[in-house]
Image: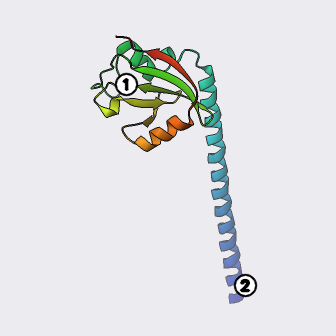
Amino acid sequence: MDQGDEIGEYFLTLESKLVMRTSFVIATFILVLLASCLDERDVAKQCADITKPLEEILALKSIVKNGVVIGRKQCTIYAGAQIFSGMYKGGKVFYFTNPASSLAICGFIAYNCQGEEVFNRALNDQEWEDFMGELTDIEQLWVKNP
């Protein structure tokens, strides 16, 4: 075998490694994409399965039953505080308003169906305003009476 054949064989090996690596990266990307789509369907199904959000979503249940905003024990829930449901970008959301609170972090919080905080007006006022502007099918679920 002469030197030319060795160089040609080396480049063929290098090229096949590159093709295999590229194929692996593309396959991994496709799997991640498919998995994220399945997760979105699971989340949508979980939202559809919720019939009593004030009892089934821990964050909302904690506000209504215990008067506690999860992760914010310093928050006082005042008379007039409310919980609403609505549709945001095709998904169900729930939001809590506590306008009498002097602590901004306790005033306006939106949650997804898993009870995870998705928006907080205190953290990003413009994001909250955009959220409220795009919210549809709003329904009041609870109000704290004096």
Mark 1 vs mark 2, CA separation in Å: 77 Å
Label 1 Cα crowd, 10 Å radius (few <14 / some 14-19 / many 20+) = many
Q: Residue at x 37, y 41 (%)?
A: 123
Quarter of the figure with the N terminus: bottom right
Quarter of the figure with the C terminus: top left
Residue 2 in view in this figure: no
Label 2 Cα crowd, 10 Å radius (few <14 / some 14-19 / many 20+) = few
Three-letter code, disc 1: Asn
- The picture quadrant where one finds residue 107 is top left
Name the spot of residue 140 as percent of width and height, x first: 51, 19
The image shows residue 17, relative to residue 31, as above or below, that is: below
Q: Residue furthest top?
A: 146
Name the spot of residue 34 as percent of width and height, x first: 66, 43
- The picture quadrant where one finds residue 122 is top left
Q: Report the side of 62 relative to 86 (left or right).
A: left
Q: Report the side of 5 relative to 36 (left or right).
A: right
Name the spot of residue 93 as percent of width and height, x first: 54, 29
Residue 63 in view in this figure: yes
Name the spot of residue 139 as percent of width and height, x first: 55, 21
Q: Residue at x 67, y 50 (%)?
A: 30
Q: Residue at x 44, y 17 (%)?
A: 61
Residue 5, disc: 2
The image shows residue 35, relative to residue 82, as above or below, that is: below
| Element marked by disc 2 | helix
Three-letter code, disc 2: Asp
Residue 98, disc: 1
